[in-house]
Image (tube, helix red, strand yellow):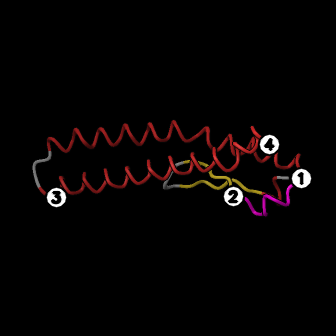
C-alpha cells in the first residue's frame, strides 16, 4: 500500500514526518483504511513531544526577553516566540484533524 497510496515527508517547519495521502480515502479497501489509520496514529504520536519541545524553547525565549538589553534583541525574541506559537498552533490543529478525521472513524466505524 505505501508505494502508491501515501508517502512520508519530513516537515522542517513542524519538525515531524507527515503522511501525505495520494489517493481519495473513500476509494480504499477496509484493509487499506486500517493500515492508513495505523500510519496516522504514528504521525499523531510525534506531535505531543514536538509541541513540548517548541513550548520549552518558547519559555526560554520568554526568560531571555526579560533580560533583553536592546530593541533589536527584544524584537528578534518576539518574532521567534510568534513563530513558535504559530508552529504549536499548527501542530495542535493537525493533531485534532488526525484524531477527528482519520482515527475517530476507525474507533467508531
Residue in the image at 63% along x and 52% along y: 18
On the image, the x and y values in percent for residue 93 come to: 52, 51
On the image, the x and y values in percent for residue 34 come to: 82, 43
On the image, the x and y values in percent for residue 5 come to: 80, 58
Labelled disc at residue 98: none
Q: Secondary structure at mark 2?
A: strand
Q: Nearer the viewer, residue 44 or 4?
A: 44
Residue in the image at 85% along x and 60% along y: 27
Mark 3 / mark 2, whichever is N-terminal = 2
30, above or below 49, in the image:
below
Spatial CA distance of label 3 from label 2 is 39 Å
Q: Magenta part of the protein: which range? A: 20-29
- Left or right: residue 84 compared with residue 5: left
Between circles 1 and 3, the one closer to the viewer is 1
Between circles 1 and 2, the one closer to the viewer is 1
Query: Which quadrant does the C terminus fall into?
Result: top right
Quickly name the residue at label 2. Answer: 20
Q: Give the residue furthest to the front.
A: 108
Q: Quadrant of residue 53?
A: top left
45, above or below 2, in the image:
above
Quickly name the residue at label 4. Answer: 109
Mark 4 / mark 3, whichever is N-terminal = 3
Mark 1 / mark 2, whichever is N-terminal = 2
Q: Residues within 10 Å of mark 2 (few under 14, many from 20)?
A: few
Mark 2 / mark 4, whichever is N-terminal = 2
Labelled disc at residue 29: 1
Q: Secondary structure at mark 1?
A: loop
Between circles 2 and 4, the one closer to the viewer is 4
Mark 1 / mark 3, whichever is N-terminal = 1
Quickly name the residue at label 3. Answer: 72
Amino acid at each position: 500500500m505505501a508505494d502508491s497510496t501515501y508517502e512520508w515527508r519530513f516537515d522542517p517547519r513542524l519538525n515531524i514526518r507527515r503522511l501525505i495521502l495520494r489517493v481519495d480515502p473513500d476509494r480504499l479497501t477496509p484493509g487499506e483504511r486500517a493500515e492508513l489509520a495505523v500510519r496516522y496514529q504514528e504521525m499523531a504520536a510525534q506531535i505531543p513531544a514536538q509541541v513540548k519541545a517548541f513550548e520549552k524553547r518558547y519559555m526560554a525565549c520568554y526568560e531571555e526577553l526579560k533580560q533583553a538589553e536592546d530593541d533589536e534583541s527584544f524584537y528578534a525574541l518576539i518574532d521567534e516566540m510568534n513563530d513558535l506559537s504559530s508552529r504549536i498552533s499548527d501542530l495542535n490543529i493537525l493533531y485534532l484533524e488526525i484524531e477527528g478525521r482519520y482515527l475517530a472513524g476507525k474507533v467508531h466505524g
